[in-house]
Image (tube, rainbow, N blue to C red):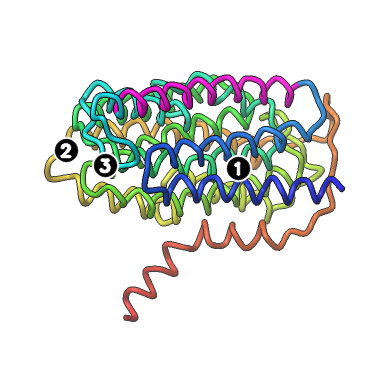
Amino acid sequence: MLKIYKMIFFSTLFIGTMISVSSYTWLGTWMGLEINLLSFIPLMKMDNNSFSSESSMKYFLVQALASSMFLFSIILSMMTNNLINETLYINNLLMFMMNSMMMLKMGTAPFHFWFPQIIEGLNWNNSLILMTWQKIAPMMLLSYMMKSINLILIVIILSTMIGSIGGLNQTSLRKIIAYSSINHMGWMISSFLYNELMWVMYFLNYCIITIAVIIMFNNFNIYYLKQMFSSLYTNFFMKMMILFNMLSLGGLPPFLGFMPKWIIIQYLSSNYSYLLLFMILMTLITLYFYLRITYMSIVLSHNELNFNLILLNKNNFLMIFFSFISIYGLIVLSFIFNFF
């Protein structure tokens, strides 16, 4: 019965995002966002623990605030234009409010305050949905609306800086991945300076690498840095997979995570060289806490644990498949491009 409920909510989660992305009217996009929100909250609550209940309540309050302000902006625009369900001329103030609400919905700086706290109370599966699928509709709408160069530059600087510095003092892997997601959001929004839809390429690469990392942590039930000490669940092969996936998530060549950053650097280097220098320096900081994870996994090893280690016997096919794409994807793509 629980699986049937999950299938229903997953399907409505998918439908809500598709309605928002494909709608012709602002009210249609708002309706899709609400369907998406009301489908994800039961999935968060199915963990049956106090942390998931707290996270689901926080998530509902934040998303409800963003949706209500977004709807307020839509209605105010219709009142000022005397139009309903048609193309609207929206002034700068209302456009800024709509952009801000979309950034609040997907947890981009400076509206990131809720994102790491909510992920801390979720399991890895729900964290994966929140960091990937839940960002599609707000990011697509943001690419339609966000035309102010100054606003784009401010969001890029804040997201890359907060995403890199915020993860330095964390011991929870979920918060580290959350701050990493904020940093990647800054890189995605930087693609708006060249092309509104170039972020899709970055987002697909980010999803592949994030899926590989989260499946790996979920299979071994790892949530904190101290659990990386254990030698009970990792052999040399698994340690190397953790190392390479972390470096790929940090965007280090020759892994797949370097490809979208490389393309963005190539397109923006002529007009935004100082901005790119700042983004690269902030990304180097994120590489520090990725290397800290891999260092603990490889160098430090002992069997005396002060926590409960639960070994999960799961199928490792998906983990190996996505890890292979994450690690060797750039090399395979290079061979394909050279061949053709």
> Which of 56/93 is in front?
93
Secondary element type, mark 3: loop
Which span is picked out in magenta? 51-77
Residue 24 bears which disc, if any? none
> Which comes before the other along the chain, label 2 or label 3?
3
> Can you give x and y, in whole percent of width and height, for residue 188 in the image?
36, 42
**Which label's residue is closer to the chain start, 3 or 1?**
3
* Residue 120 at x, y percent in the picture: 65, 26
Name the residue rendered at 26%, 30% in the picture: 82
The residue tagged 3 is 87
Q: Nearer the viewer, residue 72 or 260?
A: 72
Q: Which residue is mark 1?
A: 129
Q: How many marks?
A: 3
Residue at the spot x=27%, y=25% of the render? Answer: 154
Question: Which callout, 1 or 2, points at the residue further toward the start of the chain?
Answer: 1
Please tell me whether mark 1 sits on a helix, a strand or a loop: helix
How would you rate the neighbour count of disc 2 (Cα within 10 Å): few for under 14, some for 14-19, many for 20 or more? some
Q: Nearer the viewer, residue 264 or 338?
A: 264
User: Left or right: 272 with respect to 125?
Assistant: left
Q: Where 142 sits versus 166, above or below?
A: below
Q: Residues within 10 Å of mark 1 (few under 14, many from 20)?
A: some
Q: Residue at x 73, y 59 (%)?
A: 316
188 or 85: nearer the viewer: 85
Q: Disc 1 marks which amino acid?
A: Ile
Disc 2 to disc 3, C-alpha distance: 33 Å
Inspect the magenta stretch and tell me whether residue 131 lies in it. no
In space, the residues marked 3 and 1 are separated at their CA atoms by 32 Å
User: Viewed as shown, does residue 303 lie left or right of 320?
Assistant: right
Prevailing SS of the magenta stretch: helix
Look at label 3 and name its amino acid. Thr
Label 2: which residue?
A: 272
